[in-house]
Image (cartoon, helix red, strand yellow):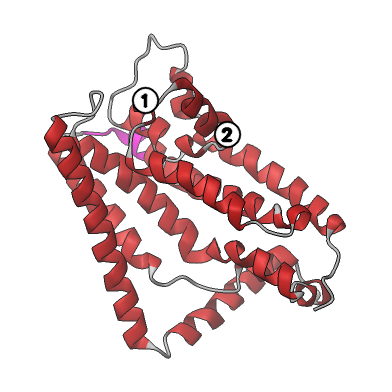
């Protein structure tokens, strides 16, 4: 059984386990739907009060938010278990992944299937569809292709960022604080256009924590807000490249982390 087949098998086992508690499945899904509707409502209230936010209309903000949600839900549905790596290291249970004849990373990622993220995915698709109609967009085949590539690239970016953040626990013993810092930047980029913040913030979310490539930069092109005269306009097309670079970094950091690892003895 290769790594991909093993991962699919682990996900299947997780799904069967979750479906034994159908009431919890329904409640969790409904809860996420309500949560995202509230977030969209807050954006609508804020932008409506100010008419626009640095040139971004309410439906453009909805598009920006739902672009993030759709990509993030794709990641969370299958790979979000990386966030629990700290727990395995502290408890000493990470040893079990090393003793089995399979990739430890695949075992960690396939540990759980976050079925409730289906709700986020539906919210993202619905919000994007409504925004597309309300903004009168009429994409050609190239833009539709770019949209699909951008979603996949964004999911890879958030996956890579979370794995890299989780790997910090191999050196520091904990990763929760790092997750909180990264989460603060992610929360702002998810809900607001990057161009309303200062230069320092834009540099951080473009180069150090490149989450702006998940929604802001692709949205500039997809919403026809790209300024061709801007010397940085090329960033709007860079999401796939950033995703590939991060994949390479994750591979290197993971190998270094395994060499650094010493059992807690728990």
Along the horizontal axis of the image, is 186 left or right of 241?
Answer: left
Disc on res. 241: 2
Is residue 118 placed above or below 223 in the rendered structure? below
Residue at numbered disc 1: 195
- Asked which secondary structure carries label 1, the reply is helix
Which residue occupies the foreground of this view, 252 or 28? 28
The residue at the point 62 percent across, 70 percent down is: 7
Question: What quarter of the picture does the C terminus occupy?
Answer: bottom right
Instruction: Give the residue drawn at x 66%, y 73%.
Output: 6
Percent x, y of residue 210? 54, 36
Residue 205 in the figure: left or right of residue 148: right
Q: For mark 2, does the 10 Å Cα neighbourhood hold few (<14), some (14 to 19), or many (20 or more) residues? A: few
Q: Position of residue 178 (x, y in %)?
A: 60, 50
User: Residue lying furthest top in this view?
Assistant: 229
Q: Tag 2's secondary structure?
A: helix
Q: Residues in magenta?
A: 138-145
């Amino acid at each position: 059984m290769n790594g991909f087949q093993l991962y699919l098998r682990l996900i299947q086992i997780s799904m069967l386990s979750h479906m034994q508690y159908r009431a919890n499945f329904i409640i969790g899904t409904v809860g996420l739907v309500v949560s995202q509707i509230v977030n969209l409502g807050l954006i609508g209230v804020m932008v409506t009060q100010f008419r626009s936010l640095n040139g971004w209309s309410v439906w453009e903000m909805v598009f920006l938010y739902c672009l993030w949600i759709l990509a993030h839900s794709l990641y969370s549905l299958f790979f979000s278990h990386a966030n629990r790596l700290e727990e395995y290291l502290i408890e000493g249970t990470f040893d079990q992944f090393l003793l089995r004849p399979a990739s430890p990373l695949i075992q960690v990622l396939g540990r759980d299937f976050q079925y409730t993220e289906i709700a986020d995915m539906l919210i993202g698709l619905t919000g994007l569809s409504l925004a597309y109609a309300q903004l009168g967009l009429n994409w050609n085949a190239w833009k539709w292709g770019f949209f699909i590539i951008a979603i996949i690239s964004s999911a890879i970016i958030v996956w890579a960022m979370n794995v890299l953040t989780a790997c910090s626990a191999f050196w520091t013993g904990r990763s929760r604080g790092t997750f909180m810092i990264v989460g603060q930047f992610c929360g702002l980029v998810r809900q607001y256009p990057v161009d309303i913040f200062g230069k320092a913030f834009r540099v951080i979310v473009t180069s150090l924590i490149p989450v702006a490539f998940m929604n802001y930069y692709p949205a500039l092109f997809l919403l026809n807000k790209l300024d061709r005269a801007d010397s940085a306009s090329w960033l709007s097309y860079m999401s796939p490249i950033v995703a590939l670079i991060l994949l390479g970094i994750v591979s290197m950091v993971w190998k270094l982390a395994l060499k650094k690892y010493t059992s807690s003895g728990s």
